[in-house]
Image (cartoon, rainbow, N blue to C red):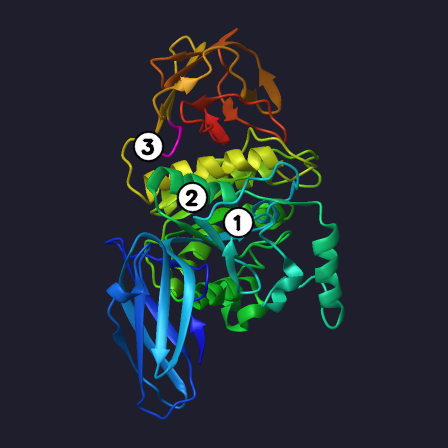
Amino acid sequence: MELSGPMERSVIQRGKDGLSDIPVAGTVEAPDGTEVLGRILPPATAEAGIEWVRLGGVKGGRFAGMLSGAATGGPYRVQVKCGKKMLTVRDILVGDLYILAGQSNMDGCGKLVDCEPSSRWVRCFFYDDRWDVAEDPLCWYNEAADPIHWGVAGEGRQEAARHDRDFRTVGAGLGVRFGKEVYKRTGVPVGLLICSHGGTSLEQWSPSKIDRGGRSLYGSMIRRVKAVGTQVAGCLWYQGESDAATDQGLKYRANMGSFIEALRRDLGQSRLPFIQVQLGPLYTSFEVFPHWNRVQTDQIDLEQDVAKLATVSAVDLRLDDGIHVCTQDLKTLGVRLAHVAESLIYGNKDKTLGPRLKSAKLSKDRQVVRLSFSGVNKQLQPKKGIRGFTIELGDTPIPIDDIAIQRGTTVVLRLRSPLPSGAALWYGKGFNPAVSLRDAAGLPVPVLGPVSL
């Protein structure tokens, strides 16, 4: 007898009631109609105390059924028997599954030094369709079941995979810290479905390529969700760098909206929570990524277009190289994503999605700009040394003499002289801006602009 599911160390998506049905399937050498039994063994429960239930009958050497009633948590054992044959699958958790998709900053390209320690409550469905405890690196392209991720094709792939294991020096990401933080805040185990691939554009993620299955990024992602046999709690997305380098960056808002709509349709989850990371800093020039700021503002504007979507800013994070967030700040980003998930997905009304510009008002003498923010966790900070705001008239910067916070959620900019007509406000403009404004939960003000004044 062999089981195709459930897998050891897997995470099963729970329902809204916190309970899960665990699908069981396999093969066995037995006559058609032979009864197959199964049972779920909760933690620290003696086998003698749990009754067997009927999964179904054998047909053509195969069987399938469902075991019900596993509550959030674990680890559980599942036992299946047919006649004198019995198998036990151990270390199964019931919790929430998250798609991790996008490009290299979602892969994780932090140096493999001081990585986030693993946790028994956070698992990963790795590219080789294997469940295990989540541990950086999560992405091993040449071990993938789907060809779209292979860096080397043919006979050389196994050697390339061994080389990766022997010599890899980067690959720390945000996923392990995110999962641990969600578990810490909610008590819900987390399963990470890694689906990202570095250097990829939205065109490469096109839902129109779903029919290519594992030979397309989108097809591979949908296949992997179906391979775990359930829906998911949410999707984490970090992408846009490649689009910012081409004129596709001018269409990012519309293209991303279409992508999310298709993902929700193809997963049968019309209100699938979607949490994206707004592009952070970059050590290069406008010549290489001419639409960087455009993609950033499109990302924050998507919150107006798409329900159950939230954006997390990365503008203040440090890089390990010209484009990749460093190991320590990927951990910070994991915490921010967990905070937003706690609000958007788990319904904690004491948590908000972070500061968003609500209004910008210019005084009658045109020398004071008052910026009101919504979504602030408690208050904005720091009280002194606020950086990141610029006001421009065309290409000419306008001096700002003083920046202060009033009543916790209002930022006041005082100008040296009356502001000319046609000026525009930005926060976080440029590639490596000096920014400092966050709320008490550590969520930064996102890149925003141009705001006409």
Q: Which residue is mark 3?
A: 351
Q: Which residue is mark 2?
A: 302
* Mark-to-mark CA distance, 3 and 2: 21 Å
Disc 1 secondary structure class: helix
Q: Are marks 3 and 1 in contact (CB under 8 Å)?
A: no
Residue 280 appears in view: no
Residue at which label 1 appears: 251
**Residue 34: x %, y % from top left:** 32, 88
Asked whether residue 201 appears in the rendered view, the answer is yes
Q: Residues within 10 Å of mark 3 (few under 14, many from 20)?
A: some
Q: Amino acid at mark 3?
A: Lys
Q: Give the side of residue 81 with respect to residue 133, left or right.
A: left
Identify the residue at horizontal 55%, vertical 23% (top origin): 435
> In the rendered structure, does residue 229 fall within the stretch colored magenta?
no
Give x and y (percent) for residue 42: 31, 58
The span from disc 3 to disc 1 (Cα, nearest Å) is 32 Å
Instruction: Write the start and end of the magenta stretch as one range.
Output: 351-357
In which quadrant of the rendered view does residue 322 lie? top right
Choose between 26 and 146: the one closer to the eye: 26
Q: Position of residue 358 (x, y in %)?
A: 36, 27
Q: Amino acid at mark 1?
A: Lys
